[in-house]
Amino acid sequence: MKQQIIVSGLGGQGALTITRVLAEAAAALDLEVLTSETHGMAQRGGTVISMIKVGPFRGPLIPPGGADVGLFLALKNLAVHRSYLKADAAVFVNSPVPGDFQNIDAQGLARELGAAVAANLILLGYAAGKQALFCDPELLEQVIREKTPERFREMNLKAFQQGMASAK
Amino acid sequence: MMESESLKDKKLQRILMGNEAMARGLIEAGVTLAASYPGTPASEILQAVPGFARETGVALHAEWSVNEKVAFETALANSMSGRRSAVSMKQVGLNVASDPFMRSAYLGVKGGLVVIAADDPGPHSSQTEQDSRFFAMFAKIPVLDPSSPREAKSMVGQALRVSEKYEIPVMLRPTTRVCHARQNVPLFRPQNLERPARFEKNPGRWCATPQYLRELHRLLNKKIADMAAEEEFFPILTPGDDTFPGVCIIASGVALAHTWDLLEEMDLLRRLDLYQVTMPYPLHRDFISHIKSRYQKVLVLEETYPVIELQLVLDQVQGRINRAVPGEGELTPEVIRRVLEGFLNLPAAAAPTLPGGEATRPTLCAGCAHRAAFYAIRETFPEDIFPSDIGCYTLGLNLGAVDTCHCMGAGISQAAGFYHTYAAAAEKVPAIVATIGDSTFFHAGIPALINAVLHGARIMVVILDNSTTAMTGHQPTPEQGMTAAGGQAHPVHIADLVKACGVGFLKEADPYDIPGFVSLLKEADAYCRGENGGVAVLIAKHFCILDREARKSQEILEMCVTEDCTGCRHCLDEFECPALSLDEATYQVVIDRARCIGCGVCVHVCPAGAITASPKKEQ
Ligand code: SF4
Ligand code: SF4
């Protein structure tokens, strides 16, 4: 099993949360996992990217053209990070407008849920619901339930489930 | 599958960030004192120490020191008392700690001392991409170079063991890609070394005067020579078949990990000899002759300077020096791939399309008080000089209120320098407003302030006091009086320090009140230019709005943009709150409800008075 995933967003959108959930899910399946994250100045609203490599890799970075899955929290990042995707990659974008990718208005749905910050997990739930990830949606749900701090738990679960439901 | 089994049962390994893995390694290796000053990419190391200590029931002293030099010396004393110690910092922090670092090579240690210096090739979040391994070589201190979080963790123990064996500090040099990678890492129970605290007097060593140093230097040279013969540090070979006779690659750190993955992808793994160097300095004594006698063509991949390469000094070596490897920048997989293709005479794969589109630049958070302070400074002094410093507030450069950013604490000294430059040239002295964050002020601002006062610099210093070290993840500053573990410590107050430095003008205000802050700036300017003028200090006090607790006390205003908005863009270009944007259809500004925190500051910014605030209606 090998899968390479990029999560692209703006600092503050929760790319790190998605990264962690995916990494925990891989570990729960006893798979090797390596991730890479953006820290520092860029986290103040700048372009950020996380990479998740599941399987027997040694380095944390995905080369251009290497990613099987792309999760984009911001449509404008597509131009910046598209080069990391394989030609046949599964691409999910938080955007109300469709394009040459699978779109979901995660931001809009999050606002309806009353949790503008949970768009990240809606997008993740959507990709999981589309069976694009290395693991079942149920496992991700379990990770979110067990690893989210109490005060965000319910909201995060709801967001994830909302994303999954939208994939049906 | 996982259904009933809880994830919590999987205790023996855990997903850890490289920095957390090293923190865990410190606890497992029996470290009893860990000190640090926050800085990307090293901050999460000390941050994670108290948690692992608590979890495993280990007693230790963990501290956010006021700067890296202090952190180093504090850890050194623990080690001189026979106990294992650690100090962690980002690479430029080692510049600050260089004084005690250099001498500790000569005097050595008793309990193991690991110096974690995290490098930032790229750089991603630093003012240089300097190579700490070079610094280690300069100091004659051995250095280990991990390629992954897992390896970084196990090298912590290795470093401490070797440090004790040779009585010398050992550097562990991770890079950003190791620090901020996450990996499943095995956990072990902490070692209990049961070492009492025993400082044994030995003035010839611990106070070594010049007469002793020549002998200590000889000893140091011997230690390095002996370490260079240690079998455990002979580079690790992954042998190839005979596809590339006489050819090998030598790599260290994360460059080795990238190279491994690339060779695998290119179907070349185990087709040519690949060496991993775990201790780049001192390079194993026999390795050099080993390479010389076996290979005609050698490629060295390491970050960021040619440390291994310089020690190999062989004609057949290609690397940074002959430009087979770019002389600067991070060795990302795409860079290494091109190097490998050149080195092995392979056809180049279709050139990867490099990132297109424009990356979004970072900006101060919506509602950040720094933005208000910078805006007030720019409004008051449109054409003047603004030296600044390192932290979130460096982003004031987006607002035209940051003209310099050099190294920790430089803003105040540069401000004074600018003053003397203009004064000595007998020219009209512009208003000179230095900005410096609270944590940076404690770190290196105080000597600069004393110096500015002493030499009569007529400058303004705005201390941006948001009660935290925000940029690196909100570590406490001395003003909070809080320990790294969240316990009580003795607070030290900025205002007291400023007064004690002999500053003649000191005011404190909340920059959210822009008109009030502007009039204070004018007052400060008048003081600077007055008959007995000198340094004027304003403390701009407002908590960081990412502090959830503090935020609870702040009123959330209902913001509204009225029809009076003329679309002049003043609030966008000069104030740049990320919650404000221009609606291209109406050509009026709109507020993004999801990002706006209702701070109300933009009310003071709109020249047409089109932004209004009212108390939030109860839902
Ligand atoms: S983290 Fe705090 S200090 Fe930094 S930009 Fe945001 S509000 Fe300002
Ligand atoms: S009130 Fe104005 S300045 Fe404050 S966050 Fe909202 S839009 Fe930005």
Image (cartoon, grey):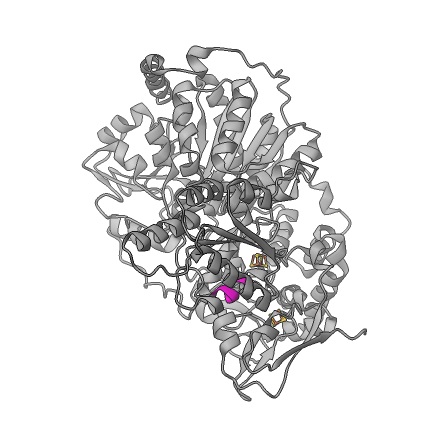
On screen, B399 above or below B49? below
| Along the line of sight, the residue nearer the viewer: A7 or B392 | B392
| Along the line of sight, the residue nearer the viewer: B370 or B549 | B370
Ligand 2 located in image quadrant: bottom right
State the image coordinates of residue A125 (x, y, percent, origin top left): 66, 65
Note whether residue B337 is visible: no
The residue sitting at the right extreme is B619
On screen, B76 above or below B129? above
Q: Is residue B206 magenta?
A: no
| Along the line of sight, the residue nearer the viewer: B469 or A114 | B469
Question: Quick check: B261 left or right of B325?
Answer: right
Quadrant of the rendered structure where residue B515 is?
A: bottom right
| Along the line of sight, the residue nearer the viewer: B572 or B332 | B572
Query: Which quadrant does the C terminus of chain B fall into?
Result: bottom right
On screen, B231 above or below A141? above
Question: Quick check: B291 left or right of B526?
Answer: left
State the image coordinates of residue B417 (x, y, percent, origin top left): 35, 49
Q: Is residue B374 magenta?
A: yes
State the image coordinates of residue B356 (x, y, percent, origin top left): 40, 69
Residue plotted at (55% across, 14% down): B199
The residue sitting at the front extreme is B531
Residue plotted at (37% across, 27% down): B234
Quadrant of the rendered structure where residue A22 is?
A: bottom right
State the image coordinates of residue B368 (x, y, percent, origin top left): 59, 62
**Magenta part mainly helix, strand or loop?**
helix
Specify the segment rendered in magenta: B372-377
